[in-house]
Image (cartoon, helix red, strand yellow):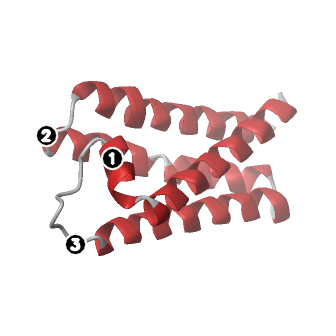
Amino acid sequence: MTTTAYVLAIVLDLFFLFIGARFLLQPRPAAAGYGVPAKPDGDAAYLTVKGLRDGAFALLGLALIAFVGARAEAWYMLIVAIAPLGDTLIVLRHGGTKAVAFGIHFATAIVVLISAGLLFAV
């Protein structure tokens, strides 16, 4: 179970790093994948902020697991689960589909919570 807990946490952190990089490098396609497409004449700065935030959160998670340990990463994952839960509501409130809201964001929150539980059990 220890290996599974660590691997899942690292994979999730790397996934969040990928999402952050995508918002920095390809902001409009990333926004469409998020479930709420960006307006063509909208302010791209907000998409950059999301990319930077996601990337920074991912690096923090990787640093915690590398330098502090499983318990710190577990608390981090527990708190970070708030972001995809909030994303679920954002997509629903702003015209996104239920499939994206629940199939991507809510499912991600569940996997992050599972990761937290596994890390607490280590």
The image position of residue 2, as x and y in percent, is: 85, 34
Q: Please state which of residues 37 and 9 is positioned toward the viewer in this rendering.
A: 37
Q: In 3D space, how far apart are the residues under numbered discs 1 and 3 (Cα atoms)?
A: 19 Å
Which residue carries the number 2 mark? 95
Closer mark to the observer between disc 1 and disc 2: 2
Q: In 3D space, how far apart are the residues under numbered discs 2 and 3 (Cα atoms)?
A: 19 Å
Residue positioned 81% across, 38% down in the render: 122
Residue type, mark 2 in image: Gly
Image label count: 3
Other-residue count near label 1 (Cα within 10 Å), few / some / many at <14 / 14–19 / ≥20: many
- Above or below, comparing residue 42 to residue 80 in the picture: below
The image position of residue 109, as x and y in percent, is: 47, 38
Residue positioned 64% across, 37% down in the render: 115
Of the two numbered discs 1 and 3 on the same chain, state the one appearing first in sequence: 3
Q: Please state which of residues 61 and 119 is positioned toward the viewer in this rendering.
A: 61
Quick check: 72 left or right of 89? right
The image position of residue 33, as x and y in percent, is: 36, 42
Quick check: 46 left or right of 120? left
Other-residue count near label 2 (Cα within 10 Å), few / some / many at <14 / 14–19 / ≥20: few
Q: Secondary structure at mark 1?
A: helix
Q: Secondary structure at mark 3?
A: loop
Which residue carries the number 1 mark? 87
Which residue carries the number 3 mark? 43
Residue positioned 23% across, 56% down in the render: 38
Residue 108 has which mark?
none
Residue type, mark 1 in image: Asp
Quick check: 121 left or right of 18? right
